[in-house]
Image: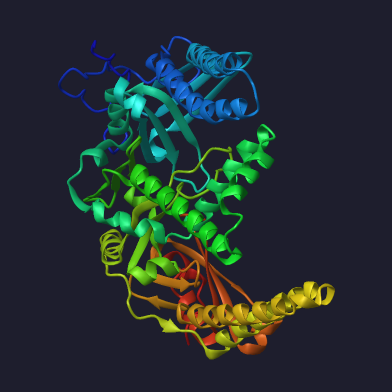
Amino acid sequence: MSRPAEPPWTPADPAGAPADPPAGPWRAPTGPTRAPDDPTEDWRRLDPRTISASAVLAAGALVVAAVPVGLGLLLGGVGIGWVLLWTIGGVLLGSAATAVAEAIRLAVTGYRVDAHRIDRRVRFLSSTTNSISTGRVRNVEITADVVQRRLGIATVKLASGETDGSRLTLAALDRATAEELRTHVLAGRAGAETSEIARLDPGWVRYAPASLMTPLFGLVGIGLVFQVASWFNAVPALVDWVWERIGTLPWALIGVGGVALAAVVGVVTSVVIFVESWWGLRLDHHRDGSLELRRGLLVGRHTSFDGTRIRGATLYEPPGFRALGAARLDVIATGVGTGKDESGKQKQSPALIPASPRDVPAGVAATVLGEPVPTLFRAHPPAARRRRAVRALAATLALTVLGLVPALIWPWLWWVPVAVLAVSSAVAAWVVIDNYRGLGHATTDSTVALRKGSVLRGTDLLRREGVLGWNLRRTPFQKRAGLVTMVATSAGGTGAFRLPDVGEGDARGIAATAGDVWEHLREPQA
């Protein structure tokens, strides 16, 4: 394999001035920085190996889709010749179309990098240029799927420091060029002194099935089978085939078997997703507070988080994790979060540590925040528990009333409202007790911790200097009970972190954690 082309930029020092070219084969040319619209500036092309990578991935996806399609056609009575034509021909045609589309994309896309900015231009029917300042890049993510790794290329995603700020993706570059770009953008931070603070333990996979998504995965898997069958009008045949084998069994056993099947599918799916997402996990902590995360089996990810943009962390402990003594950790940082940003692009994932023994994510959070995670939380007033009890009682009554409908139509279903009342009462009582126990807050010299929820319990650990302010909200019922809902405003994550039903006295103390920037707004003391 020939040596990759040299990057056309000069690495900059932290102050922003061009530094001396690095030693070795990656020496870059020096010279004045050109204007972004300078027509004499050389635009570089993306790596042409991305055409082969995309075509191979498309072929693999089409082959996976062709298997159920071929089976459905055979069950529908289509001849084997036509089945091969539609499946093999579809795979070849789809792969060729993907290669042509990628070739066109590479022909119309160019990029350039200098000491101060990165530009990407697309010139097709019109010309579009996206730019991002290297001084504002705070998060860098390098991803490479199994085909890209084999071909030696990678995709680079750059994100600015704003919550919904600029993002720029270069897909794909030579792997060495991608690493050089990361080093150039992060300047001295990329090579700062680091220490490893977490590494994957294969035993953590036992916590994956405890996720709340496991039952959903099972239902989705079974639903996909019927969805594929419906494409070929084979649902009746599928139902008949299943009913011939289980129709003589008791209904109770059929129900238990269906739940067991969904559970097995969900567990297998959860384990597969865990292994693919977290294989090879290694988390490094830089001396300046920045983080480097490496993980992924089929799609390798190398993510860098700027320490100056980290505002805290969130510890997630749903019921399954709590029962096993496990937790998951996400980072709270600007430009990082779930969902999509204002330009419609996927935000950088906040995941730091997967489901693992609670001491592991708690220790990582302590390293990132500079102090241990609080273990003692201040409980909220009993009025907060009463509010939850009232809501649970209302939900139980509503479900029971719905359960009365079939009993009024068919009297022999008298047991339905009784069962609904018994089950919903037990679940509501547990939710009220567990939710109130999980409600609390704690403040230290540098952090404020907000804990809430039962099924979706999470503890937001916010740096006090990153809290921009507090919003206080009160309904008429909260006002009568002497409670306040507080929402912390921060530049990281979702931007708003809610703490419900705080006592009025505690609210004043929590509001004082908004950071030194708000000192001038305080009333002068007598």
Q: Is residue 10 visible?
A: no
Query: Where in the figure is residue 501, as x and y percent of width and height?
Result: 56, 80
3 vs 103, nearest the viewer: 103
In this rendering, position of residue 142 left or right of residue 519: left
Decide: is 377 above or below 11: below
**Residue at the far front in the pictured view:** 248
Query: Where in the figure is residue 40, as x and y percent of width and height?
Result: 44, 9
**x 68%, y 84%: residue:** 477
In this rendering, position of residue 490 left or right of residue 443: right
125 vs 356, nearest the viewer: 356
Query: Where in the figure is residue 17, as x and y percent of width and height?
Result: 29, 31
Asked which quadrant contains residue 10, the reply is top left
Asked which quadrant contains residue 2, the reply is top left
**x 39%, y 31%: residue:** 156
In this rendering, position of residue 473 left or right of residue 366: right
**Residue at the far right in the pictured view:** 409
Query: Where in the figure is residue 440, as x and y percent of width and height?
Result: 45, 79
Decide: is 16 above or below 458: above
**Residue at the far left in the pictured view:** 23
Model colouring = rainbow
430 vs 253, nearest the viewer: 253
**x 52%, y 16%: residue:** 88
Total number of numbered discs in the rendering: 0
> Quick one: quadrant of the N terminus?
top left
Decide: is 317 above or below 292: below
Q: Is residue 263 visible?
A: yes
**x 60%, y 78%: residue:** 423
